């Protein structure tokens, strides 16, 4: 009979770990959390030191009963939940739920599910780290306070089924702020001038870009400026004034963290954050490999550390030396953190064995598992390799007082790029024609003039939102994917072609949160809260101090919002549409997809219609009303009510005024009016409220 019991979180790990440990060990799974705060109430005793009230999660009774039977048989119990705050908290909840206080209980952790790692963890068994548990308790309690106190206000003011969250609401605010920035962006005109030269003795022409005047870099902001430059240089003598040669290195990338894996999988594989984490979990817990049984292919997937163990470092060096040559293998590299506290007990995400080459196990993996494993494998292999080296050449061509430049690079040593090239860093080699030295005279072949307009900041994608949250210090590796999933599920944000757009509902929720709970959606406040939670983990801050400092301000803000809510008339807004069944004035209602018109005679009359908000502006194509509409996914735009007969539509709100230059309609862009024809470029300030 087994003398020792190992409790893990996931049933998927049971078989693999049992195989490593043999007959003396029984392995059982808790299926994640076994205790949590009750769903029906706040579950925190705010009158008595904010003590949480934990209950057994519904459906976990049978699992706990089976675990209690196993506990009775065991001499020692090892709690082997995941190696992070949440895993530590699950171990503590198991200790309490199974009443293990009088038993021989040990906490073990491993960053990869391999025989060596699991056996090594048993040698380094320890007590439960209450600082980690308290950091998780603090996060759970804070999130519960925000969600349970604010969400009912959203139900009362907007509609049921909505939610607020400590990280979720800030993520929505970040996306809304970017939308405002894009909407108010005024494009600015600029021009580029490229010159193509004939080089003596060479068939291939040389193309150079306009740099500026007298060695000073300058941009060309108008056609008039461009024409003046063209007039100057057309009859000038073109002479090579400077040739600089140099060498540039591009460092190998760091191995993946949770954030960088999510970003790169989105860009390269087009995976959502949720899909990336689901597949990574499968690779971590173990996949059935033909001829080898179930094997954990990657290390733990929730980490913000780039550290690599000495053992993995040595194996990687040996593999690279053998397969690529010693000049490709790098010495031990230093892990780099982003200046914030990282969970450095963890490692970066890497293959558990670099010798397990992706192509050799492709048949045992699903298509998506293979693609993600290959990405992780290549990134790790590249991170242990030497930098790539390039020869660079920079040429300046004089045309009187004007200057043109050419920059080119040539690969000298491919280094890590022999294995892995990031989407953002693909090198375009620009090879120069030969025979160019200082003093070489060139003849002008042609000048190419191009008009451009500056572009606004791009819409957030899941990848760029994860990067923004990480850079701002909001949330942790385990929170990025669920946060994005929640704001999409609540229809606050919609996704089109990778881009995230705020819906009308998202705008309403964000505006209410900014007005009633400014600190909750304040980026700096939320980042500071994360720093305090890190302090709890380090043992320097008491978790109840964090909670007790937070709750009174939240409670006061909720009470003020509730009072103001009572003063708001939340009766249905009457529209100017008449019900074509019973003749009543139809009212505006909110549904899961936004506003619609409904007959107030419900249930006798069940007539409904789409609701289109008129903006008081006539369509420039057909003269009918322009109305506020939404795409199928909830993104706002302005279109003709006569659609599909009339196809007029714009993303910014039309003003009803025409451009004095070209006659096109002027659109609102922040505090300015801009011509809807971008090639016109007319912009004017909004002079007064009457302009709006």
Image: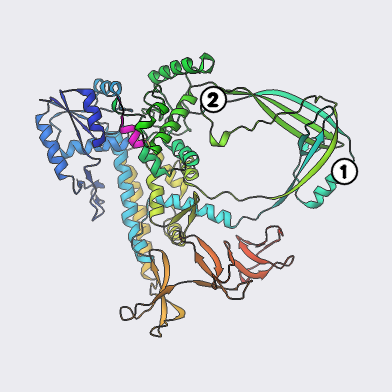
Q: Is residue 391 magenta?
A: no
Q: Outermost residue, bottom direction?
A: 583
Frontmost of labels 1 and 2 is: 2
Q: Label 1 to label 2, Cα distance in Å?
A: 46 Å
Tell me the residue that label 1 is attached to: 232
- Disc 1 and disc 2 in contact, CB within 8 angstroms: no
Q: Position of residue 189 (x, y in %)?
A: 71, 52
Tell me the residue that label 2 is attached to: 418
Q: Quadrant of residue 443?
A: top right
Q: Is residue 520 visible?
A: no
Q: Position of residue 329 (x, y in %)?
A: 50, 17
Q: Position of residue 45 (x, y in %)?
A: 24, 50
Q: Secondary structure at mark 1?
A: helix
Q: Position of residue 384 (x, y in %)?
A: 48, 22
Question: From the viewer's perspective, is 52 left or right of 424?
Answer: left
Q: Which residues are magenta?
A: 280-291
The numbered mark, 1 or 2, whose residue comes first in the sequence reads: 1
Question: Looking at the image, which residue is at 76% across and 36% down?
Answer: 207
């Amino acid at each position: 009979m087994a003398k020792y019991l190992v409790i893990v979180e996931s049933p998927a790990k049971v078989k693999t770990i049992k195989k490593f440990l043999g007959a003396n060990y029984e392995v059982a799974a808790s299926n994640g959390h076994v205790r949590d705060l009750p769903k029906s109430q706040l579950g925190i005793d705010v009158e008595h030191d904010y003590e949480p009230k934990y209950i057994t999660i519904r459906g976990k009774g049978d699992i706990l009963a089976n675990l209690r039977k196993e506990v009775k048989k065991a001499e020692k119990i090892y709690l082997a939940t995941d190696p992070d705050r949440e895993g530590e908290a699950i171990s503590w909840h198991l200790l309490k739920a199974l009443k293990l206080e009088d038993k021989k209980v040990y906490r073990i952790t491993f960053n990869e599910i391999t025989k060596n790692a699991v056996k090594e963890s048993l040698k380094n068994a320890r007590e439960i780290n209450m600082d980690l548990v308290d950091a998780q308790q603090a996060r759970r309690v804070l999130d519960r306070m925000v969600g349970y106190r604010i969400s009912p206000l959203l139900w009362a003011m907007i509609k049921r089924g909505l939610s607020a969250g400590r990280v979720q609401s800030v993520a929505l605010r970040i996306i809304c702020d970017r939308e405002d920035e894009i909407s108010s962006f005024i494009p600015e005109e600029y021009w580029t001038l490229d010159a193509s030269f004939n080089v003596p003795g060479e068939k291939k022409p040389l193309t150079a870009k306009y740099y500026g005047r007298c060695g000073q870099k300058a941009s060309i902001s108008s056609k008039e400026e461009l024409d003046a430059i063209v007039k100057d240089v057309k009859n000038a003598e073109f002479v090579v004034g400077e040739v600089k040669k140099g060498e540039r290195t591009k460092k190998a990338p760091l191995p993946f963290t949770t954030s960088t894996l999510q970003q790169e999988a989105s860009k390269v594989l087009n995976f959502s954050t949720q899909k990336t984490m689901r597949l990574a979990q499968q690779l971590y817990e173990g996949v059935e490999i033909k001829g080898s049984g179930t094997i954990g292919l990657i290390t733990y997937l929730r980490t913000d550390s780039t550290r690599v163990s000495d053992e993995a470092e040595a194996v990687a060096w040996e593999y690279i030396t053998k397969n690529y040559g010693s000049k490709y293998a790098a010495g031990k590299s230093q892990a780099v953190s982003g200046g914030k506290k990282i969970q450095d007990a963890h490692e970066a995400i890497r293959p558990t064995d670099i010798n397990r080459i992706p192509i050799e196990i492709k048949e045992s993996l699903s298509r998506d598992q293979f693609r993600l494993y290959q990405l992780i494998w290549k990134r790790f292999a590249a991170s242990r390799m030497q930098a790539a080296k390039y020869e660079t050449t920079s040429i300046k061509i004089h045309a009187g007082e004007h200057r043109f430049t050419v920059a080119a690079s040539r690969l000298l040593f491919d280094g890590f790029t022999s294995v892995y090239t990031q989407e953002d860093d693909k090198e375009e080699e620009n090879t120069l024609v030969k025979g160019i030295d200082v003093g070489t005279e060139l003849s002008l072949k042609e000048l190419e003039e191009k008009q451009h307009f500056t572009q606004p900041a791009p819409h957030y994608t899941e990848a760029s939102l994860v990067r923004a949250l990480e850079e701002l210090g909001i949330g942790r590796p385990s929170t990025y994917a669920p946060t994005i999933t929640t704001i999409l599920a609540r229809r606050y944000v919609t996704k089109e072609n990778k881009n995230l757009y705020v819906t009308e509902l998202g705008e309403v929720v964000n505006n209410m949160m900014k007005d009633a709970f400014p600190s909750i959606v304040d980026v700096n406040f939320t980042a500071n809260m994360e720093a305090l939670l890190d302090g709890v983990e380090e043992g320097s801050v008491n978790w109840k101090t964090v909670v007790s400092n937070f709750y009174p301000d939240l409670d006061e803000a909720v009470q003020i919002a509730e009072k103001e809510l009572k003063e708001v008339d939340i009766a249905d807004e009457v529209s100017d549409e008449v019900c074509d069944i019973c003749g009543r004035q139809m009212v505006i209602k909110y549904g899961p997809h936004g506003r619609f018109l409904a007959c107030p005679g419900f249930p006798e009359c069940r007539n409904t219609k789409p609701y289109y908000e008129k903006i008081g502006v006539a369509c420039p194509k057909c003269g009918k009303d322009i109305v506020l509409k939404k795409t199928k996914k909830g993104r706002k735009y302005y279109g003709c009510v006569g659609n599909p007969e009339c196809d007029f539509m714009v993303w910014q709100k039309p003003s009803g005024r025409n451009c004095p230059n070209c006659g096109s309609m002027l659109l609102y862009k922040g505090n300015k009016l801009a011509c809807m024809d971008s090639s016109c470029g007319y912009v004017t300030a909004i002079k007064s409220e009457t302009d709006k």
